[in-house]
Amino acid sequence: MNLEFVVLLVHEGTTTHVQGVAGSANPATLQAVIEAAGGRSRDLHFGPIPDDGHPALLIPLHLGEAVVGCLCLGPKISGEPFRSVDRDLLSTLSGHLAALVQNAQLTDDLRLKVRTLDVLNDRLEGAHE
């Protein structure tokens, strides 16, 4: 499946940000994708990107009830529509991507906690000297 672009969006709290882009998505297209994914729908969505009218496939990345991100696939370079086989495969992969996104977020959280504990430990050692 050759695509014009692929965008991975990650939801953190009330913010949605671009985690990665492959292909040729201009800034206006990226902004339109973020806005389209901002609703955090749990359903597969297919439709045009508002700014440029290109068809896109938005695949929500959900774990249980939480939507942790969204994968946006731009139009196929061939101009062919997305088939049900494409959608089924991407729906299956979305669960794995959601787990990867959550694991990355948890790893970042742990690193921050380790840094905080290191600082507190240094202060404690300094107080005992």
Image (cartoon, helix red, strand yellow):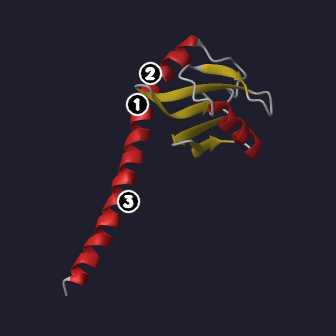
- Compared to 104, does 90 lie above or below? above
Q: CA separation, marks 3 and 2? A: 32 Å
SS for dot 2: helix
Name the residue located 24 percent from the left edge and 76 percent from the top edge: 124
Q: Which residue is disc 3 drawn over?
A: 112
Q: Secondary structure at mark 1?
A: helix
Query: What is the CA distance from the residue labelled 1 to the residue labelled 2?
Result: 8 Å
The tag on residue 96 is 1
Q: Which residue is mark 2?
A: 92
Mark 3 touching mark 2, by CB under 8 A? Answer: no
- Of residue 16 and residue 14, the one placed in the foreground of this image is 14
**Three-letter code, disc 3:** Leu
Single out the mark in the foreground, 3 or 2. Answer: 3
Picture quadrant where residue 37 is located: top right
Circles 1, 2 touching at the beta carbon (< 8 Å): yes
Tag 1 and tag 3, C-beta contact below 8 Å: no
Q: Residues within 10 Å of mark 2 (few under 14, many from 20)?
A: few
Q: Quadrant of the N terminus?
A: top right
Image point (73%, 22%), residue name: 79
User: Label 1 is placed on what type of residue?
Assistant: His
